Amino acid sequence: MTAASPALLDLTLPELTEWMVGLGFPKFRAGQVYTWLMKGKRPGEMNNVPLALREALAQNAHVGGVTICETLESPKDGTRKYLYELEDGNILEGVLLRYHHGNTLCVSTQVGCRMGCAFCASTGDGLIRNLTPGEILGQVIAVNADLGGGRSITNLVLMGSGEPLDNYDNTLKFIRLASCGDGLGISQRNISLSTCGLVERIDQLAQEGLHITLCISLHSALDEKRRQIMPIARKWTVAQTVNAARAYAQATGRRVIFEYALTNGINDTCQDADALATALKGLPSHVNVIPLNAADGSTLSASEHVEAFLKMLEDRGVSATRRRTLGEDIEGACGQLRRRRLQERAEKIPE
């Protein structure tokens, strides 16, 4: 295998077909291989393709997905936390959320994160590297297989570790791979992408012709307060971020979701509710008020005024609900399990 050997899960069916024809195999074999890949199978397990093809795949390519190395399940609500291992030994995590409308998988787009949000465990050790499209897709394929095969995952949220728009090209290709009818066939309307607010990328995303839901981590509509929580706010103001959201909603016809982690003494007052209502006026949007689940070492604490804040927003005409909290008993918040496993690895390394 050479350095140029492709990761099979990075390829669309037309790309896989072109590559396999280049190896001397007929086009129809690519469809067979692609079907197996979407089931999480390795070349040696593809029992309806010739041995010569299986050997060629093993010698000239690698799969490029993930392996589930640990699973935790909440006895309270059935939420599952997955720890994945990549082919290079890096680890990342994902969360399976069970709702009445189907199974939602929270996927990661980077190993680590460089955004530095004050409440998030994913950013604690910085950005290690971007995930490839196939490594993001591999998370969905692995969990589908873990749930018994088929297309068990019906909804995707790009809210795991990493900033999706900081890994723009790979994230976009993943969305197209996941929603392709040749593959998993997940409707783009069932895919949500969460960003801390990379304004120029939001503007670019609005022109991609996708039908996904844009979610923006706002957490305060007051610039001074938002800068305390999110370093990205030093680059773009609340007004710039909300204006990008307005342009996205206008271009796509999709309402925008604003995530608002309620933090004690920082963003849970009447002043904060007033600012949020003013900022979002006239914008097709919804606010997810999230009880804060801060990373270890964070100086932030959860607000005790969630219901009161929701009432303030309701009185001001803002569409808002409290996000259902799942998986608290299994380190469900983004980055927690990975960080603990990395600490355990470090403690085992002899001095």
Image (spheres, grey):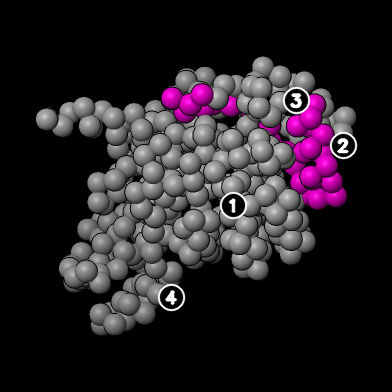
Residue tagged 3: 269
Image quarter where the C terminus lies is top left
Query: In the displayed structure, does residue 265 sit left or right of residue 37?
Result: right
Numbered disc 3: secondary structure: loop
Q: Is residue 43 above or below residue 229?
A: below
- Residue 123: x and y in percent read 43, 40
Cα gap from disc 1 to disc 4, whole angstroms: 40 Å
Numbered disc 1: secondary structure: loop
Residue tagged 2: 317
Numbered disc 4: secondary structure: helix
Cα gap from disc 3 to disc 1, whole angstroms: 25 Å
Cα gap from disc 4 to disc 2, whole angstroms: 48 Å
Residue tagged 1: 235
Cα gap from disc 2 to disc 1, whole angstroms: 29 Å
- Residue 206: x and y in percent read 66, 63
Task: Residue at 55% x, 34% y: name it.
Answer: 98
Amino acid type for the residue under numbered disc 3: Thr
Residue tagged 4: 14
The span shown in magenta is: 270-299
Q: Residues within 10 Å of mark 3 (few under 14, many from 20)?
A: some
* Mark positioned earlier in the residue sequence (4 or 3): 4
**Magenta segment: does it hold 114?**
no
